[in-house]
Image (tube, grey):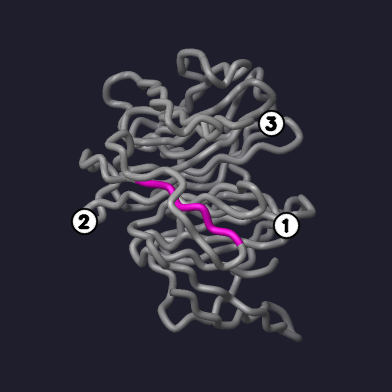
């Protein structure tokens, strides 16, 4: 199903822009990723909303220009697919206690499974800088790094840094930005947006000190802003990279956002998965 609503802009002279709601064939969609002029949408497919389920019903939908198809069907390898990263034809997908790698150029091949250490359950998002791929694990407060020089034979994940509740990751100009989310559902003072300015000598420092249940994080097309999603209160905000001012992005929706998750900005368009509502909210920047 697709529906068109309107986006109410902020400021004294607000603009309205079309908002598309896409939900056809989606079930508990957590993450999006640019792909072939459209986006990939990762779905749990589980009987109930459980990010740590082990049902093996996860799947990935390809959405483009209003049409969709299942790109990766439920094959038993995915249960709670979250953040995705594409390197060449290899799609890396976060899942429960592991990262699953599919070769989209050879879909008949079995995916490679990269296990994380025991207890590193809530593997959440991925971001790369050169041949280094970073993976956040929310429940342990860890960020791992692995070598993807050869994406078909990615290296073993190594603990890189500890950050409170790391969820969404974004990297630009050699700096990483981390959206922090409390695993127990209660945002505390340390659950903010962090910046790590030197990836070779990593130190996490608050970039925006307002606590929240931050999930997705992505740069605007011009790089002047940083978008973040938040579960408490549920919504989407824009952070000015120079002033660090936080401005809500006002959406006029028949059904408000409940759990905005791992969004994508692609070609001037935002794709925001609303996990509990099994839909993606789409609108122009």
Q: Residue at x 48, y 27 (%)?
A: 143
Residue at label 1?
267
Q: Report if the CB atoms under discs 3 and 2 are less than 8 Å apart.
A: no
Quadrant occupied by the C terminus: bottom right
> Residue 153 appears at what percent x and percent y?
52, 15
All told, the count of numbered labels is 3
Marks 3/1: CA–CA distance: 26 Å
Q: Which mark is residue 197?
A: 3
What segment is highlighted magenta in the picture?
A: 59-64
Residue 132 colored in magenta in the image: no
Among numbered discs 2 and 1, the one appearing first in the sequence: 2
Q: Nearer the viewer, residue 211 or 177?
A: 177
Q: Quadrant of residue 283?
A: bottom right
Q: Nearer the viewer, residue 278 or 256?
A: 278
**Image disc number at residue 48:** 2
Q: In the figure, is residue 14 to the left or right of 39?
A: right
Circle 1 packing at 10 Å, graded few (<14), some (14-19), many (20+), is few
- Distance between the Cα atoms at labels 3 and 2? 39 Å
């Amino acid at each position: 199903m697709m529906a068109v609503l309107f986006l109410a802009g902020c400021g004294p002279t607000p603009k309205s822009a079309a908002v598309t709601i896409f939900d056809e064939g989606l079930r508990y969609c957590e993450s999006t990723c640019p792909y072939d002029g459209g986006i990939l949408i990762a779905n749990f497919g589980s009987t109930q909303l459980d990010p740590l389920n082990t049902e093996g019903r996860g799947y990935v939908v390809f959405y483009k220009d209003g049409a969709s198809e299942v790109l990766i069907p439920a094959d038993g390898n995915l249960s709670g697919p979250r953040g995705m990263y594409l390197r060449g034809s290899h799609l890396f997908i976060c899942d429960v206690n592991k990262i699953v790698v599919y070769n989209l150029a050879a879909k008949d091949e079995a995916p490679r499974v990269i296990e994380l250490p025991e207890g590193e359950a809530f593997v959440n998002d991925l971001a790369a800088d050169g041949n280094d791929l970073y993976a956040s694990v929310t429940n342990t407060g860890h960020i791992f790094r692995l070598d993807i020089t050869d994406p078909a034979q990615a290296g073993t994940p190594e603990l890189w840094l500890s950050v409170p509740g790391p969820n969404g990751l974004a990297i630009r100009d050699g700096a990483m930005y981390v959206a922090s989310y409390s695993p127990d559902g209660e945002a505390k003072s340390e659950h903010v947006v962090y910046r790590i300015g030197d990836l070779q000598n990593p130190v996490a420092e608050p970039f925006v000190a307002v606590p929240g249940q931050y999930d997705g994080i992505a740069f605007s097309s011009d790089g002047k802003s940083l978008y973040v999603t938040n579960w408490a209160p549920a919504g989407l905000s824009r952070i000015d990279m120079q002033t660090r001012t936080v401005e809500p992005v006002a959406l006029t929706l028949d059904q408000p956002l409940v759990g905005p998750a791992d969004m994508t900005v692609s070609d001037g368009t935002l794709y925001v998965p609303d996990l509990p509502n099994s839909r993606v909210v789409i609108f122009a920047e």
